Amino acid sequence: MKKLLAIVLTILMVISLMTGCSKSANAPQGASSEKTLFNAGKYTGEGQGFGGTIKVEVEVNDNEILKISVLEHKETPGISDPAFAKIPEQIIANQSVAVDTISGCTLASKGIIDAVKAALISAGATEEAISKALEKGTASADIIKKSADVVIIGSGGAGMSAAVEAVNAGASVIVIDKQSSVGGNTLLAGSALNASDPERQKQQTMSEAELKTIEKILAVEPKNDAMKEWHDTLQKEIDDYKASGATYLFDSPSLHKLQTYIDGDFVAEIEKVEILGEEAPKAIKFLEDLGAKWIDQIQAAVGATWKRSHTPTTDLGTKGASFVLPQANYAEAHGAEIMLDSKAEELIMIDGRCTGVKGKTTEGQPFEITASKGVIIATGGFGANVEMRQKYNKHWATLDESVNTTNGPFATGDGIVMAEDVGANLVGMEWIQLIPTYGKGVFTPYIENQFYINKEGNRFVHEDGRRDELSKAVLEQTDAQLYIISDANTVKDGMTTTGTNVDERVGNGYAWKADTIEELAKMINVPVENLQASVDQFNNSLKTGNDPFGRTVFDKEFGVGPFYAGLTGPMVHHTMGGIQVTTSCEVLDTNGKVIPGLFAAGEVTGGVHGANRLGGNAIADIIVFGRIAGQNIVK
Ligand SMILES: Cc1cc2nc3c(=O)[nH]c(=O)nc-3n(C[C@H](O)[C@H](O)[C@H](O)COP(=O)(O)OP(=O)(O)OC[C@H]3O[C@@H](n4cnc5c(N)ncnc54)[C@H](O)[C@@H]3O)c2cc1C
């Protein structure tokens, strides 16, 4: 069984090859009279990974690469671990840098390969001599056969939450993932989990503008009985809140449900929204019990529309790690097997029931896993599949390769295709979310102390709006880009409250920093008077509760330097549509009938968010419905 890759904050990894003829040297030596491949010694080299420079030290004798040590890197822990574990090992085993990159951490792999190559060239090698093509072994044609009560395809937050519930119910579980590490997009998450949590939210006050937002929600005509019930509950809660003279930030499952449903344009499945709003607070507790921890402040993620986003600490590496590694560690410790580098390709159906899954390992070896209780598809969305984006897109001018994605390359909709092949119904496939703010120019997913300007220096949108509205507004601006402007309320001593080192980003050219607004305007080449007017407008709106663009989510007055700017633009971020499931996560066919033995949860499903997903609601969705799938498949 492959062991889970441990998250490490600092990697100093030494991989040595013990050979009888190795000759150690502490410093480069001159070439010997015989023709040799290298000048024996230790050499350093650098390459560019995803997060920045990767520095390695390579030790060689006359003809062999003996040892590769990673000295420095800024790659994301967890995601890049497989590259650091495997690439040096493969280079040494093959005595060549022509090794394959590792899926899911391609840039880290390339950075390591380039760094080793640079070191070897310093050791006197020619590029040709160290790049000999590898002899690829042919994968065994023998089928790997395994069986378990429950097979889960996908090791992201949905799959791993399902695994926890299934092992807790006494089932044997195999989780397969085509990547070399667990986590999927969940590991990359920004990271916000929406749940009403009045105890924590009480630490903040509610502004007049926020109260007006609730009144606006209460003024929306209920579309059905469930919505009317949420509406009536919220009305009562708010009446009680006002009568008590309270000033803290109000929240409740009713408000969460109403915001999810209204901002999803009333096309979400109402029973799923009901479950999401009620169960999200329990998802917080579920993760806490498994070891996740939160920073104190409850914030509003971009597109969340309310301050109910919970942010994990970075104790487990990335912030997103807390949404998946606690479950993965627990499930594995309680007997679940995690098969990495294993791609599911087809569901096994016998007499209309799903009884397992077939696929191939990265090496090409076929596998077949039978599941006595059934299979849970938790393969995530299709944000990285341009063909599927184009096939289903109805609402954006194009979603071809010119539109980047925030998703990992594995988000190719495989589960949707496999389910459709066995008759599953798909819902809401045209609802594809663009996020207006992603990348190194974005320091935090939270918006309350930031504002956006276009390249003319003017605000153009209410920053607390829905992601589809924000993205549409950005696409209408010059170069379809925006600057996010921050002050010391977001970046203090070079760091955000969510742990991003912004000064390092400035140093690497991803962001700008200035002591005054005037200086910042000059740096980003926008008219000073426009940027100053934008600052004044932000502060005036905060004071009066009357923003020309309708913004209501604010925190503190803007104006304490240093000031920062980051440049960004819309990217494909989330796919709201997918496999149709019951509230028990059983997959439905095109006739509305349950496909026995087949379950699905997470971004691979449709119906939870409707036309637009609130920022922070996806993590709530995958934990809540992942758990439900894991509980019900065992029942
Ligand atoms: C950069 C980024 C930041 C985000 N930030 C937030 C946030 O802060 N808050 C929020 O609510 N949402 C956020 N989201 C959205 C959220 O992270 C995702 O919707 C959610 O993590 C999806 O979880 P999942 O378990 O359904 O799928 P994933 O976590 O994507 O896991 C799916 C897994 O299935 C595997 N897989 C796919 N196909 C196969 C196959 N054929 N065989 C075997 N394995 C397969 C993949 O390799 C992957 O590991 C963010 C998304 C991204 C990309």
Image (tube, rainbow, N blue to C red):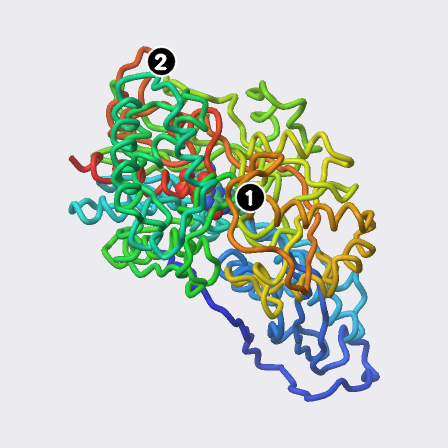
Q: Which residue is drawn at 66% across and 45% down?
A: 537
Residue at coordinates 22% horizontally, 44% vertically from top-left? 166
Label 1 belongs to which residue? Answer: 544
Q: Which of 577 and 418 is in front in this view?
A: 577
Q: State which mark lies toward you, 2 or 1.
A: 1
Residue 211 lies in quadrant: top left
Percent coordinates x, y for residue 577 in the rendering: 45, 26
Q: Work out how far the residue at label 2 is from the one at label 1, CA to CA, in angstroms.
A: 52 Å
Q: Which residue is drawn at 24% across and 23% down?
A: 596
Up the image or down, 555 lies above or below 373; here it is below
The tally of labels here is 2
Q: Can residue 101 be seen in this view?
A: yes
Q: Nearer the viewer, residue 602 or 229?
A: 229
Q: Which residue is drawn at 80% across and 60% down?
A: 519
Q: In this view, does 585 lie to the left or right of 129?
A: left
Q: Is residue 366 visible?
A: no
Q: Would residue 49 be found to the left or right of residue 128 on screen?
A: left
Above or below, 503 against 542 in this view is below
**Residue 512 image offset from top left, x and y in percent:** 73, 58
Residue 166 shown left or right of residue 484 in the figure? left
Q: Residues within 10 Å of mark 2 (few under 14, many from 20)?
A: few
Quarter of the image with the N terminus is bottom left
Three-letter residue code for mark 1: Thr
Q: Do the residues labelled 2 and 1 touch (CB within 8 Å)?
A: no
In the rendered structure, the answer to whether residue 102 lies left or right of residue 115 reads left
Which quadrant of the rendered structure holds the C terminus? Answer: top left
Residue that mark 2 sits on: 590
Q: Percent position (x, y) of residue 201?
A: 35, 52
Q: Is mark 2 on a helix, strand or loop?
A: loop
Rate crowding at label 1 as few (under 14), some (14 to 19) or many (20 or more) other CA atoms within 10 Å.
Answer: few
Q: Where is residue 7 in the image (x, y as percent from the top left)?
A: 44, 64
